[in-house]
Amino acid sequence: MLFLSFYYFMDLLPKEKPRYTPLSPEMKQEVRKLERYSNGIRLIVSEKLKTVDDVKSYISQTEKEIEDITNLRQKYRNKLRNCIDDNLIKEYKSKRDNCTTILNRHRKNIKIANYILEDTPNVKKVIEIEKQMRKEQEDIAKTKKKDRYEKWY
């Protein structure tokens, strides 16, 4: 805090907070795309997915889990309808809410996994273009070195 005050009095820090300027629609779209890629990478790392087949099997496994949890949640809802004990009602409601939380997480992960499958061909194409560009740059650098070397002799 002492240093912040020092910088403030030396006019190195602004006295007012800068005003927020909204992003352009194009920049907002790029931010969304960046968040989409970041979420995909987080899912890949957390679930240790290595191939497209791993992603597909993850989706099918998660869909089965969603079905099981949905059935479990429905059982808690059915128990709630006939229950009259307040303690049991609280317990069933908390279990039902926990099931809902898990379902939301699984649905979000399936959505992210589907984005991964959707983005894979485009990412592969971009990687191939980048590899080709790097190879061309290396060839140009080698040619320049070779030309310099030959000029000296």
Image (spheres, grey):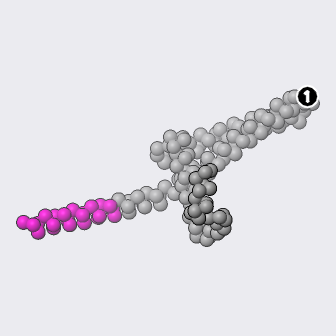
Q: Residues within 10 Å of mark 1 (few under 14, many from 20)?
A: few
Question: Which residue shows up at 59% across the image and 40% down it?
Answer: 61
Q: Is residue 114 visible?
A: no
**136 left or right, relative to 2:** left
Q: Position of residue 114 (x, y in %)?
A: 57, 52
Does 66 sit left or right of 11 as displayed? right
Q: Look at the magenta stretch and give its main secondary structure.
A: helix
Residue farthest along the right direction in this orientation: 84
**Total marks drawn?**
1
Q: Where is residue 80 drawn, in percent x and y? A: 86, 35
Q: Is residue 26 above or below residue 53?
A: below
Highlighted range, magenta: 132-153
Amino acid type at mark 1: Asp
Q: Of 39 and 145, which appears nearest the observer?
A: 145
Q: For the C terminus, give its image quadrant.
A: bottom left
Q: Is residue 31 above or below residue 83?
A: below
User: Residue tagged by mark 1?
Assistant: 85
In this picture, residue 22 sits left or right of residue 137: right
Magenta stretch: includes residue 144 = yes
- The question of residue 140 being in magenta is answered with yes
Q: Nearer the viewer, residue 8 or 78?
A: 8
| Residue visible at 58% across and 67% down in the picture | 27
Report the front residue among 111 and 70.
Answer: 111
Q: Nearest the camera: 41 or 81?
A: 41
Residue 146 visible in the snapshot = yes
Residue placed furthest toward the left: 153
